[in-house]
Structure formats: structure tokens, C-alpha cells
Image (spheres, coloured by chain):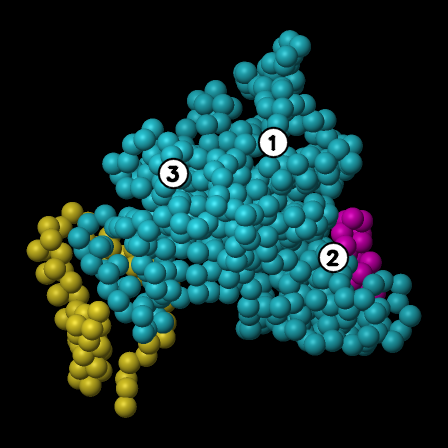
Chain colours: A cyan, B yellow
Amino acid sequence: MSAAVEFSNLGIKTILLESSDSFSDGSRAICWSQRTLEIMDRSGAATKMLEKGVTWNQGRVYLKHHEIYNFDLQMETDLKMPAFINLQQYYVEEFLESHLRGKKLTDIRRLNEVDDISITENKTALLSVITPNGKYEINAKYVIAADGVNSFLRKRLGLETKGQKFEEKFLITDIHVKEPYPMERRFWFDPIFHKGQSALLHVQPDNILRIDLQLGVDADPKIESNPTRVQSRIQKMLGENIDFDIQWISVYSFSCKRMDRFVHEPVFFVGDAAHVVSPFGARGGNGGIQDIDNLVWKLASVLKGLAPKSLLKSYDLERVPAADENILNSSRSTDFMTPKNEASKEFREAVFLLSKNMPFARKLVNSGRLSSPHSYHNSFLNSKDDPAFTGKGPIPGSASLDAVLGLKSAEVWLLDYLGREFCCLVFVNDSILSSKRFEEFRKFVKSLNPQMNLVMVSRAIISKNMRATVLVDKSGKCFNKWSAIPGSVYLVRPDQHIATRWKNYPELENLEQAFKKALGHCEGK
Amino acid sequence: MSYFFADQNIEAPDDFYEMLINAHDGLSNSDSRLLNANLILLLANQVGKVEILEEAISLARKSVIER
């Protein structure tokens, strides 16, 4: 669904096949990261998520009933999106579908289930679809397989996922409580209410709590999913005087697995169909959205004839390492929660002991490393970084950094101006804007690609009567974050990741080369 | 004066912790303890300064005894 939203941003029609006639049951994915919200915001779909969602930046980690440490994820204040919101997946699906219906570019076909796929000689996909009214076929140029962890398309094409399966069982449940809870993530190691195991609590809208309880290797899923048993476990956790209703129960064990490659033209695998992780770290749903963020502009560029087909290979090269990063973090968290031998138990005990007085040890406590955007710094779409950048600032491959800026008397966000199309972000001042060189640069950018946006940021309000919009960075924070001086140029991809940058103006031919490279023209060079 | 810095000094703490735990893979409990002893001696040699080692030993002992 999020892929359809991205395509509709770019004016491309799609068909969305969905076997069910309702939104997901149970809350499923609940934690949406800053990057996900930024991606959704490009189409305006984030507004409803923010309205309905529960914003949280704080987390607390306990050992037994003592707090070991707490963290605040949003240290910076000038970002449009919060670090995380919690929102049931069915709400997100509902918002996206209503957004798509408004846009009218997506043919949403519910109760349409794919029951076969084959690849034709022309490298198109022949899909057979069952509906309540009979069967039909679609011959598709490209297919995005977002059919989940048990992906039918993956199996039908004889492809598999490889990785590690964890034996540990977990109880996951959503409950409704009468009184609101504090908006924070809480994690317990060895809690008094659930000895020897771990527990996680998340707050969702409508007074719904998500609770994850570790059950051990030998737990029997049938016994453990008995509502009476769950009721008593949760009562012990929340206290005798808390009233609640159970909304959804599942007992599960998980895997950390992925496909070797996600690109099997003309089929592209995304989300759980391509890779699965444990739920600790909010890396499942957010990882899937970032797949889409990476894939859709590439497909769109090829479909529009702006880029060669080799651009599509970069989806594998950029998202496979991202999946590995998610799998690595998720496996490590699981290993910390479930020590595998005496030595790891002892080290964990030592980490807990030292963390009382020594902040360094708290960094080793691992209750989930929360999703952050992957940086595609090894991608063949990037051009070489300019060594003149010595400070921080986003390196080629990483995601853009947001900042609050001024436009006339209003406050605006930098990220609202980046993305969808390629974009040149130029840091300017008065004298640059009135220079002949800048005029040439501007003309050249438009000649490279008429859709390319030119976004300008200046420290001071520009005195001259400019035709173009110049965003004002009064505090200098944006210049600082991007490690920029007047004359610095960033080439930003449609997914808001950085293709490359120049501290002080690129030669025009270098800009052209970098633009072509970012579109996949120079694979392997 | 205290030599000990309670603040984070290990680069990439998660990488380090994984390395440390994996080093014990397939070892018996007594071999695991021997590995740990070896590791302490190696790191102590790297630290070198007796005052720092003294403080580390006393902090480690205190954290166990006062738990």
C-alpha cells in the first residue's frame, strides 16, 4: 500500500491486489520511526498518523523493579517528525487506503488473491488472480511482492529465505485499559512479576497497551495462548487494581532471515516477504517502508525512460545491507535477552551490576536497538565525497537531515522541500545569488533535468528581488548540521538520500556525471 | 584521584559485546573462565598503570560484594 502511495506521488498508476476485504487484524506493527514518518510525509499521509498516533521519545529499562537507565530519543528540537509514534497497523492501512482513494491513481482490488505467477519470455509477470466472481489474469511489467513473511510469490518462484531461527517463545498481546498510561517504552529484565524472563510494554492510541512477555524455550503455545492464563500473567504485571480487556493474543517464536537477493525481475520483494526480524527494535514495519522508499523512485525513473534498467539492481545493493543491519541488531538484542551459555549469563549479570554506577555499562544493556535509517554509503549510485568536508553533515548515501527554516514570516521544514524528484540543495548568500556563475549553474541544473528542484538556503534574508524561493536559516543550525558554507551543493535523490556533495560549487561536468551515476548510468565504475 | 572513567569509552559497544560472547562458543564452563582470566591479563598488560588496575580491581570487587 505504501508503494502505491509513493507511485501516486509520482503520477504513476498501479493495481493493488489484496486477498482480504478488511484491514490487518491485531495491531501488528505499532512503532513508526522518524524516517517512516518523513517518507509518509512526502505524500501528506503522515498528518493523520501523527494526529491519531501516540508520540513517544522516552524509554525506560528496568532490572527487576529498579530502573537501570532511561533514554530520550529526540535530543534535537528542530525536526518536524518525532523519534517514534505508536499506532496500530490497521489505522496506518486505513489512512493509506483513504489517501489512495483520494488520489485516484491506484486500482485497489480487495478479495483479489494471486494464485499463480509465471515469468514470460518478455520478462513480464503473468499473474493469475482469484476473486469471488471468478478468475482472471494480469500481465504485469513489474510486480512488487509485499505478501508478507509467508510470501506466496516467493514460494511459487522457488525462492527461499535463509538465516537463524530462535527457539525462544514470546507471548504478544494487546489489551485495552481504562486509564491512560505514560507515553513511553518500558522494558524489564527479570521482572518481579515475570521472573527470569523479560517484558516489554508499549502504549498505543485508544488506551491500548502492547505487551510482549518472554516465555522461555519450552513454553507450549497452546497452553500459553489460553486467555485465562494470559489474563493472570497481565494482571500480575499491571497490578491487581487495573481493569483491562484482552484484544488480541499470539504466541510466537521468530526468525531473523532474508532472501539472497530481493530483485528477481520483473518481481521485487519488499518488507517481510524479503526479510524478517524479531520485533525488538521496530525494524520490521519500518524496514519495509524504507524498502519502498528505495525501490519506487527507481522503478518510476526506469518506467519514465529517465534511467537505464541497471538502476534497478541498486535496490539489491542498497537494501540487502540494510536488511543485514536490521537482522544484526535484532539478533544481538535477542541474544542479550536469552543468554545462550554460562559465560553470556555471567557477562550479562556483570553488565547489570556495573550499570548501577557506571554509565558505560548501560550502553551494553540491549533491550532492542531502535530503527534508524540505513546509510547507503557503499552504493554505486554515490559519487566520491568531497574531501573538503571535514565536519559532520550527511555523507553520500545517508538520509537528509531536517531543519527548521524561515520563509517570509512562516516556519517551514527543509525536508518538505527535498525528495520526490532529484534536487540540488544549494547553500547561498547575497553575492552568490547575484553572481553570473550561479545563473549558469541554475540553467545547467534545469537543462540536466527539467523536474530537478533547486532548493536554496541562506543565512540572511536575501535583499534582491529573486524569482526563486530562498529558505532562511537564521540560527545557522541548518548550515551547521549540513557542514555547509555559502556555495556548498548537495545532490539529493528522490528518496532524500544524498548522492554526493561539494563544499564549494561543483564543476558543471562533475554535477552532470554525479546525476547520471545516481540514475545508474555508470554501474560498477 | 580517580583514574576510572565511568563513561562510555568502548568504540561500537554492540560489536564488542558480540565478539566477547562469541569467543565463548563451544567452550566448557571451566575453559570459559580460563579464557576470561587470560583476557583480563592481556587487557591489564595493555593498561599498564598499576594505579588504574588497582582501582578497576577494587571497583569490580565492590560491585560484587555490595550487591
Q: Residue at x 40, y 33 (%)?
A: A227
* Residue under numbered circle 3: A230
In this view, the mark in front (1 or 2): 1
Magenta includes A359?
no
* Magenta segment: A435-453
What element does badge 2 sit on?
A: helix
Residue lying farthest right? A465
Residue extending farthest to the top is A134
Q: Is residue A451 magenta?
A: yes
Question: In front here: A436 or A207?
Answer: A207
B32 displayed left or right of A327:
left
* Residue A309: quadrant of the picture: top right
Where is A496 relative to A520, above or below? below
Q: Sequence order check: which comes first, mark 1 or mark 2? A: 1
Mark closer to the chain start, 2 or 3: 3
Q: Seen in the image, is A172 located left or right of residue A310?
A: left
Residue A376 x, y percent position in the rendering = 53, 52
Residue A160 in the figure: left or right of residue B17 = right
**Up/down of A111 relative to A339, above or below:** above
Q: In the image, what residue type sits under mark 2?
A: Tyr
Q: Amino acid at mark 3?
A: Val
Q: Position of residue A289 (x, y in %)?
A: 58, 43
Query: How many numbered dots are placed on residues in this image?
Result: 3
Q: Quadrant of the N terminus of chain A?
A: top right
Which label sits in the foreground, 2 or 3?
A: 3
In the image, what residue occupies the spot 12% across and 60% down?
A: B33
